Image: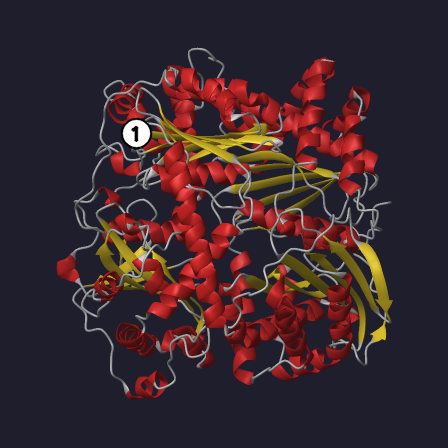
């Protein structure tokens, strides 16, 4: 039986099963309760409610959950901002957290969540504002009580208004040098000025000014009353409690939210000026970026979520297999990546966006790229509409729905609370996978909009625009817009390339065998064999009910570890293999398989995973490609330039990001600075890479893990294939794991030049050894001080938007990191504030009672032992344990047990060493005018490693 026949049979079976599910759920529904259609493999229970005040609720009961979560979405966003008060919706998002009638303390909600092992946050989008948290499951009800009050009875305390508008301004200031935010500001600037999308959306001290003539709190309260209403809200609550108990928690609390009977704000105006089309937009970037986009205005696709015409068309345009637009352009050396998908969808208007990352040669051939793109669109229009393509997409979607991975509770509730605003209650769980029918007319209608007359072509690059170029008002981003341009087409080179274009064939990787192994899962991996220099580990694991497996193969080579040059060559070798594989392997990725070849400090790793049926075929092809990679002069030149650009762009990262990278580069053995890798890359030739690739496997320390729905025989066959394909003539060698260098006594200071107006500050305080007891003390210290540090430096002192204290563990070496990025304060002022915090908090820590300390211990333990929800997360943990030779596979249990034993006296001693005394600490500060402390960096590299 051929693949196509099997596909049809599987589709028929799945369709019949879902039809039966639809009948059963329809019979179970009541007027105010709906049970959404779920995957046959989903053991959770669901209930969809409409409260009396119009607030819609989805309850999820997962009896095995150790974490609970909730998300409330309001159909109000920056598009609702009144003129002259841009950023008000974002400011409201900030203010809702800061005290309610029942819980007036502005930090109470945050501290409650944090002390019970949870996280919380919110974000403001164009038409939505989403609030969310997760927490240890037993504490869900009191958390919901606090959460509900934010929407029912917020205080909007007057004394906090100025403080929080400064926080919003710091958030705005921190992103002034981010190319993504700057490009977004240009897209707003050129959009229809009558459309709310054109407005500034973040807010700052100017748009949120607070004067007697224009009091901000009054505008805030008025906005809340005029825009927020229960009937515009959707809530998702997830926990181990029964549906009845969850409903009893939710109904009385969220019924208190006032229903003002408001309507979702409509945005019928077009996003783009049709009279200006076709148009060309050029945007000057800070980093070395080369991005080309073709943006086609189209009608909203929200009502088509069941049939997904945009998905059908975009999957063809964005295909990467042989003959695809991407494949032809990549082989020509013009593009590095290509994707197709939806832009902002307002419910009235949307866009289909084709995005490409260009090479240097691609920049010179933009006209040909654009012309060839329209040739490919025409090919899709003429030959791409075919029932077999729809049935293949539908089958893969149904399979993904059936075998979907269990998402993290927080991610699930956030996604569903937003989905509830746009889809029918019964579809909310399956909407993203639905492809109910073949709709060729919808595909044609969409394709009819993808024409040269209806396109905005955008180019982002670091090429300097003229001084007189237009600049955006808030981000000062230079851009140039040309309207009614002539779109490139019909050139002779394009005609030759167009002959190479082709549409995807039937996918040969769609699995036929989806059976599960019988019998119990193994508790942890076992060493199955040592085949010369290849160590093989195996674990059968079917606990997640998915017919999948993961394979890891690490090749540790002394050629990688000996120099920055070795690191760069390893990176380029991984790139060469990935690029060579991509056209062949892309259909495998579409059919539920994935692969990655990535460099690391000791060499490179091959990772493959997905449905077990075709996994050996993929793994064998990856290994054979690595054994004999195709390294062309053209590909080497492009990959080297891409790496150089990436390294140079790191030097434009945020100050605190560069400070953190410096700590790692200075203290981890075998790590090299950005500048050292840049120098190595610039001096490299294609012959260097070919020689390196040929020699790479001559001496390796190899280890393999096979984990999942895989037998011992499967694992042994895979290992034998690795021996035959990659390691036939390889000699055994030991490549030791890197360690972290021990800091000298006292405080070491490093200044780092960063071309950014903000001051970056990172104080890294290192533990004395890598024992579980020491690691536990630093983990607990990070938990205890994080909230207070944020409250003191960010909320009270207003030092900046980026402020946090966190465990900074590297390679099992414990540490605490204190991080601040400030638009106003100097490094000295930040350091003084940190010292004053340490002095003041010491007394609070000494006064902490045992009950409070136990809560913090349990918060750390719950995070360490958080339930693993996917095979991949378990595989990653096993792989880390194998890497560190912790082959009892119980490190997290040992660390959790050690956390539970930390006494207050031990915690105080750790606090004194790390924060009060600053012993064995590294202070990194950044500034645009500073000179980097190269001598200090060199001294650190001569330090011995931290003791075990």
Q: Estimate the x, y position of residue 251 in percent, counting from the top left.
A: 41, 19
The relative height of residue 292 versus residue 742 in the rendered view (above or below) is: below
Which residue is identified by label 1?
Answer: 232
For the view shown, which residue lies furthest in the top direction?
102
Residue 618 visible in rendering: yes
Disc 1, SS: helix
Q: Estimate the x, y position of residue 125 in percent, counting from the top left.
A: 35, 40
Judge from the rendering whether residue 884 lies leftward or rightward of residue 551; answer left or right.
right
Judge from the rendering whether residue 931 lies leftward or rightward of residue 491; answer left or right.
right
Judge from the rendering whether residue 136 lies leftward or rightward of residue 724; answer left or right.
left
- Between 15 and 881, the residue placed more toward the observer is 15
Q: Estimate the x, y position of residue 742 in percent, counting from the top left.
A: 81, 46
- Between 61 and 282, the residue placed more toward the observer is 61
- Between 523 and 75, the residue placed more toward the observer is 523
Q: Residue at x 36, y 33 (%)?
A: 90
The relative height of residue 714 versus residue 130 in the rendered view (above or below) is: below
- Between 361 and 524, the residue placed more toward the observer is 524
Tell me the quarter of the picture where residue 233 sits: top left
The relative height of residue 357 versus residue 220 in the rendered view (above or below) is: below
């Amino acid at each position: 039986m051929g693949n196509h026949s099997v596909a049809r049979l599987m589709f028929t079976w799945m369709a019949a099963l879902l039809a039966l599910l639809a009948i059963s759920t329809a019979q179970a529904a009541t007027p105010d309760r709906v049970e959404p259609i779920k995957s046959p493999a989903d053991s959770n229970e669901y209930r969809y409610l409409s409260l009396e005040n119009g607030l819609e609720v989805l309850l999820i009961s997962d009896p095995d959950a150790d974490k609970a979560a909730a998300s409330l979405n309001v159909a109000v966003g920056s598009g609702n901002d009144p003129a002259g008060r841009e950023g008000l919706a974002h400011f409201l998002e900030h203010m809702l957290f800061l005290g309610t009638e029942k819980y007036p303390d502005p930090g109470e909600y945050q501290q409650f969540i944090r002390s019970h092992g949870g996280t919380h946050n919110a974000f403001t989008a164009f038409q939505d504002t989403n609030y969310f948290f997760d927490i240890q499951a037993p504490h869900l009800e009191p958390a919901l009580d606090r959460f509900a009050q934010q929407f029912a009875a917020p205080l909007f305390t007057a004394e906090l208004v100025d403080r929080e508008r400064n926080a919003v301004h710091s958030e705005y200031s921190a992103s002034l040098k981010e190319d993504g935010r700057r490009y977004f500001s240009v897209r707003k600037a050129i959009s229809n000025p009558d459309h709310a999308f054109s407005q500034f959306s973040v807010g700052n001290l100017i748009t949120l000014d607070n004067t007697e003539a224009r009091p901000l709190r009054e505008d805030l309260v008025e906005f809340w009353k005029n825009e927020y209403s229960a009937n515009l809200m959707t809530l998702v609550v997830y926990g181990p409690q029964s549906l009845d108990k969850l409903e009893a928690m939710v109904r009385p609390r969220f019924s208190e939210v006032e229903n003002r009977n408001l309507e979702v704000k409509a945005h019928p105006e077009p996003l783009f000026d049709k009279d200006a089309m076709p148009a060309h937009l050029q945007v000057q970037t800070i980093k070395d970026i080369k991005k080309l986009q073709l943006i086609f205005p189209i009608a909203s696709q929200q009502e088509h979520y069941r049939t997904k015409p945009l998905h059908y068309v975009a999957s063809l345009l964005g295909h990467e297999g042989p003959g695809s637009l991407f494949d032809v352009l990549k082989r020509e050396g013009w593009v590095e990546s290509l994707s197709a998908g939806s832009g902002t969808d307002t419910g009235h208007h949307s866009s289909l966006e084709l995005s490409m990352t260009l090479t240097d040669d691609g920049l010179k051939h933009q006209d040909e790229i654009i012309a060839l793109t329209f040739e490919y669109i025409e090919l899709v229009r003429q030959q791409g509409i075919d029932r077999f393509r729809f049935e293949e997409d539908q089958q893969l979607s149904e399979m993904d729905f059936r075998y979907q991975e269990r998402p993290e509770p927080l991610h699930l509730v956030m996604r569903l609370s937003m989905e509830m605003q746009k889809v029918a209650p019964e579809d909310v769980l399956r909407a993203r996978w639905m492809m109910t029918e073949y709709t060729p007319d919808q595909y044609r209608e969409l394709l009819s909009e993808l024409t040269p007359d209806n396109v905005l072509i955008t180019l982002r690059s670091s090429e300097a625009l003229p001084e007189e170029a237009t600049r955006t008002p808030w981000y000062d981003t230079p851009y140039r817009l040309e309207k009614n341009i002539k779109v490139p087409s019909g050139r002779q080179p394009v005609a030759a390339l167009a002959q190479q274009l082709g549409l995807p064939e039937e996918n040969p990787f769609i699995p036929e065998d989806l059976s599960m192994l019988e019998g119990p899962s193994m508790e942890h991996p076992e060493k199955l064999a040592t085949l010369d220099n290849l160590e093989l580990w195996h674990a059968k694991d079917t606990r997640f009910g998915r017919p999948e497996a993961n394979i890891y193969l690490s090749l540790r080579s002394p050629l990688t570890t000996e120099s920055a040059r070795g690191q760069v060559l390893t990176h380029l070798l991984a790139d060469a293999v990935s690029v060579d594989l991509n056209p062949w392997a892309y259909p495998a990725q579409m059919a539920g398989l994935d692969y990655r070849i990535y460099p690391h400090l000791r060499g490179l790793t091959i990772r493959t995973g997905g449905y077990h049926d075709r996994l050996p075929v993929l793994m064998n092809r990856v290994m054979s490609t690595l054994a004999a990679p195709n390294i062309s002069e053209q590909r080497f030149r492009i990959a080297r330039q891409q790496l150089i650009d990436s390294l140079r762009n790191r030097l434009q990262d945020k100050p605190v990001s560069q400070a953190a990278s410096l700590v790692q580069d200075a203290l981890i053995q075998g790590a090299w600075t950005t500048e050292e890798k840049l120098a190595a890359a610039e001096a490299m030739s294609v012959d260097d890479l070919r020689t390196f690739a040929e020699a790479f496997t001559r001496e390796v320390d190899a280890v393999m893990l096979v984990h999942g729905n895989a037998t011992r025989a499967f694992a042994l066959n895979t290992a034998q294939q690795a021996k035959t394909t990659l390691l036939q003539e390889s000699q055994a060698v030991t490549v030791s794991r890197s360690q972290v260098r021990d800091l000298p006594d006292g405080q070491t200071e490093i200044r780092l030049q960063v071309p950014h107006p903000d001051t970056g500050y990172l104080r890294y305080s290192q533990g004395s050894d890598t024992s579980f007891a020491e690691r536990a003390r630093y983990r607990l210290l990070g938990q205890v001080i994080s909230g207070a540090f944020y409250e003191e430096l960010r909320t009270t002192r207003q030092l900046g938007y980026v402020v946090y204290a966190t465990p900074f563990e590297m390679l099992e070496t414990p540490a605490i990191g204190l991080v601040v990025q400030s638009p106003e304060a100097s490094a000295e002022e930040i350091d003084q504030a940190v010292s004053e915090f340490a002095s003041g908090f010491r007394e609070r820590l000494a006064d902490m009672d045992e009950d409070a300390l136990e809560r913090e211990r349990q918060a750390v333990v719950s995070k360490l032992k958080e339930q693993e929800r996917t095979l991949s997360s378990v595989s990653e943990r096993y792989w880390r344990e194998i890497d560190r030779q912790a082959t009892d596979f119980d490190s997290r249990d040992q660390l959790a047990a050690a956390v539970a034993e930390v006494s207050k006296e031990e915690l105080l001693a750790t606090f004194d060493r790390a924060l009060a005394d600053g012993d064995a600490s590294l202070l990194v500060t950044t500034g645009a005018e500073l000179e980097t402390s190269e001598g200090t960096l060199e001294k650190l590299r001569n330090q011995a490693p931290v003791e075990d």
